[in-house]
Amino acid sequence: MELNTLTPGVGAKHSSKRVGRGIGSGLGKTCGRGHKGQKSRAGGFHKVGFEGGQMPLQRRLPKRGFKSLAQGKNAEVTLSELQALPITEIDMLSLIQAGLISQHSISCKVVLSGAIEKAVTLKGVLATKGAKAAIEAAGGSVGA
């Protein structure tokens, strides 16, 4: 098989319409465009959704809902991940350097999942009620 011998399968290609070639072709005179009107003329197209000056559908319908720009920027870290870290002073920068959260994160919260035995100090990192209790029970502290 050579690239210059490749051809489409039989019936896969249709010949293009030859418009304006006489009455016998079925597409003579007006070339299938009908009589008069914007769509019959050369260059007679308009933007998508345009309804001739009538208020378009996408503007008539009410807008609902809200798409948060902060979604996906709030990271979560588990207690077992904190246990695996070799440091005791934990802040956002140390979590980013450890690869636990994305560098695009704007906030981080420690959740109660797993266990922690070492005393860690959280600075600038939030914690859930259960995670805070587990950290303080291990001798650590949760700062603001």
Image (cartoon, rainbow, N blue to C red):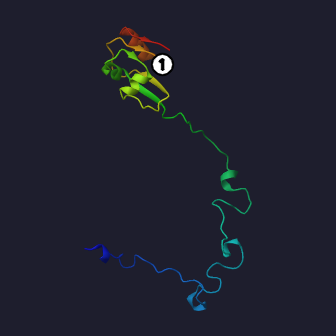
Q: Is residue 49 left or right of residue 95?
A: right
What residue is drawn where x is 71% and y is 74%? 37
Mark 1: secondary structure: loop
Q: Is residue 63 above or below residue 111?
A: below
What residue is drawn where x is 45% and y is 16%? 123
Q: Is residue 90 left or right of residue 73?
A: left
Residue 86, located in which quarter of the rendered image?
top left
Count of residue discs: 1
Q: Position of residue 36 (x, y in %)?
A: 72, 77
Q: Is residue 133 left or right of residue 65?
A: left
Q: Position of residue 54 (x, y in %)?
A: 74, 59
Question: In the displayed image of the protein, which residue is found farthest to the left?
Answer: 1
Q: Nearer the viewer, residue 17 or 115?
A: 17
Residue matched to label 1: 124
Q: Position of residue 66 (x, y in %)?
A: 60, 38
What residue is drawn where x is 47% and y is 30%? 105
Q: Is residue 127 above or below residue 47?
A: above
What residue is drawn where x is 54% and y is 83%? 18
Q: Nearer the viewer, residue 58 or 7?
A: 7
Residue 81, located in which quarter of the rendered image?
top left
Quadrant in which the N terminus appears: bottom left
Residue 80, located in which quarter of the rendered image?
top left
Q: Disc 1 marks which amino acid? A: Gly
Q: Nearer the viewer, residue 47 or 24?
A: 47
Q: Position of residue 38 (x, y in %)?
A: 70, 71
Q: Is residue 86 above or below residue 23?
A: above
